[in-house]
Image (cartoon, rainbow, N blue to C red):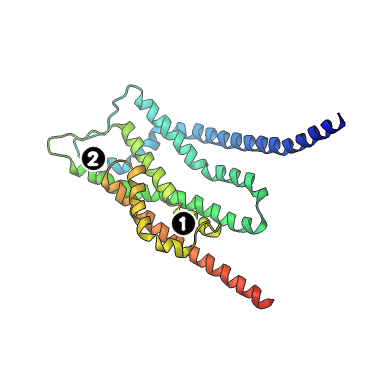
Amino acid sequence: MAKQSKEEKARMQQEQPLISHLIELRNRLLKSLLLVLIVFAGLYSFSNELYLIVSQPLKDLLPEQSSMIATGVASPFLVPFKLSLFAAVFLAIPFILHQAWAFISPGLYQNEKRFAIPLLLSSILLFYAGIAFAYFIVLPIVFGFFTAIGPEGVSFLPDINNILNFILKIFFAFGIAFEIPVATLLMIMAGITTVESLKEKRPYIFIGCFVVGMLVTPPDVISQTVLALPMYLLFEAGILFGNLVQKRKTDSAEDEQTSL
């Protein structure tokens, strides 16, 4: 019995850290969800104005006889509702990432924390930069192509729900694509790959960017190309920063050997 109680006690000691981690994870998820709901409640009052802002790149290019329409009975309510919810998530991303960082940081070494904080901040800024790039540059190009290519005699009356789905896909695709330098740098720092290996795979990466653009954007060549080219340029930026980090590691290793 004494032996059994010792085994049970050891098992309970092992289970307690797991339970405490799960409780902490639950609390941080609840905090993130609560913030999203608070931001959503604040945005919903301006949901119609928010939709007009988001769809402005299309409105500026619509022909004089055209306008946006709602084909669904509940679309005038559901579309602004969905936009407010997604906007709340986008705005809460810094807090969500901060909660994720606070959860994993106790398990990191000091040198890993030193690199992780700049990478975390960079990933947030790059995500928003991707959305801004999509809104100010990509959407006008794509919508300009769609509004100009239609045959004569066909009225262009885009549905507000389809417009929102299209815009959200573009925002998400470019927000994630702009994280490529951070992802490339993390793989190099973790030893998963090297700068030399990535340089050798440039032709395959270039083709892969177009494949990813085909999969994550709406089915048109313009969106795919406008996403694929920045993705490849961001990959080159990741190689550039990775080369600097790798060179710094080499120099520090040489300095240590010299001091010895």
Q: Is 122 above or below relative to 40?
A: below
- Residue 131 at least partly seen: no
| Dot 1: element | helix
The residue closer to the viewer here, 197 or 148, is 197
**Circle number at residue 181:** 1
Mark 1: amino acid: Pro
Q: Which residue is mark 2?
A: 62
For the image shown, how many numbered marks are present on the structure?
Answer: 2
Position of residue 153 in the picture relative to residue 97 (left or right): left
Distance from the alpha carbon under mark 1 to that under mark 2: 36 Å
The residue closer to the viewer here, 204 or 94, is 204
Q: Is 54 above or below relative to 228?
A: above
Mark 2: amino acid: Leu
* Residue 177 image offset from top left, x and y in percent: 41, 50
Q: Among all residues in the image, which is located at the extreme bottom?
A: 258
| Dot 2: element | loop
